[in-house]
Amino acid sequence: MVAGFGDLTILHDVSLDVAVGKVTVLLGANGAGKTTLFRAITGLLPPRAGRIALFGEPIAGRAPHLIARAGIGHVPSGRELFPRMPVGVHLDLGARLCPPELRATLRERVLGLFPEIAERLNQYAGTLSGGEQQMVAIARALMTNPRVLLLDEPSAGLAPKVVLSVFQALAKLQDQGMSVLLAEQSMTFGLSVASRAYIIREGRIVLSGTPAELAAERSVVQAYLGA
């Protein structure tokens, strides 16, 4: 896929696959093109060339809300919550994209995954801790009942203990058969949950492999990540 803004090309022939029921991690330094790739997948940035398919069905060129309805959930970098909106209303917003008969079951499943926010449904999102806000952002995306979940740097700005809690939730999603594409700067966190990893640098995929393969080339990977 090729994508960019105006005269600036950000992604250069990027190609990757997300395995069904697995976590795939996209590792890259800040500015490598991770967020641009997610925006292209979700229809927020029309790709200039290439193909985007969801379980074999082409989705490039569709409106963002139609891509979401097709089964792609998106947790953006920075969370993008409404500070003076209660947690429960955030979940309701996500649920508007799925059939009414599924909403109660989805909410129960999501709150079971993040019990920390189950007690804060009436609390404004802006009053939560950073970790709790990240959980709300993920929960909102899960309420769309996605087949594939895109997570853009969920560990950014969080304490290691909180990051561990979020990544444990990702492991549970994988156990439930959810397909996840995770964008991360942290090699340690990214490889800890993934079944396959891609390294992106300056808008190009420069390396890919299993976590074990990339861990064996740790110095090379760290060089690509700017570590």
Image (cartoon, rainbow, N blue to C red):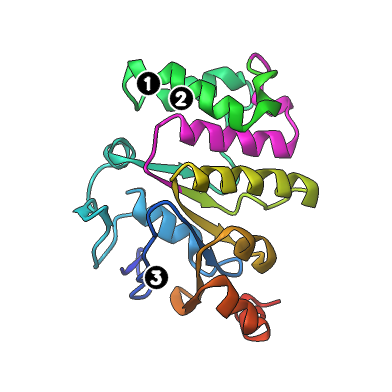
> CA separation, marks 3 and 2?
35 Å
With 94 as the anchor, is 122 left or right in this view? right
Magenta segment includes 139: yes
Disc 2 marks a residue whose amino acid type is Leu
Could you tell me which secondary element the residue under label 1 belongs to? helix
Asked if residue 225 lies in the magenta stretch, the reply is no
Q: Residue at x 46, y 55 (%)?
A: 22
Reading the image, the residue beneath label 2 is 106
Per the rendered image, the range of residues in magenta is 122-149
Question: Splitting the image into 4 quarters, where does residue 6 fall?
Answer: bottom left
Q: Quadrant of the N terminus?
A: bottom left
Q: Give neighbour class at mark 3: few <14, some 14-19, many 20+ (Cα, 10 Å).
A: many
Q: Earlier in the sequence, mark 3 or mark 1?
A: 3
Instruction: Kindly check if marks 3 and 1 are in contact, taking CB atoms under 8 A apart as contact.
Output: no
The residue positioned 49% from the left and 76% from the top of the image is 209
Spatial CA span between label 3 and label 1: 37 Å
Question: Image height check: is 74 above or below 30?
Answer: above
Q: Amino acid at mark 3?
A: Leu
Q: Which residue is mark 3?
A: 11
Q: Residue at x 68, y 85 (%)?
A: 219
Residue 2 on image: x %, y %: 31, 69
The residue shown at (36%, 48%) is 42
Left or right: residue 225 versus residue 210 is right
In the displayed structure image, the side of residue 60 where residue 167 appears, left or right: right
Q: Tell me the element at label 2.
A: helix
Q: Are marks 2 and 1 in contact (CB under 8 Å)?
A: yes
**Which is more foreground, mark 3 or mark 1?**
1
Q: Which residue is mark 1?
A: 102
Report x, y in % for residue 181.
47, 55
Categorize mark 2 by other alpha carbons within 10 Å: few (<14), some (14-19), many (20+).
some
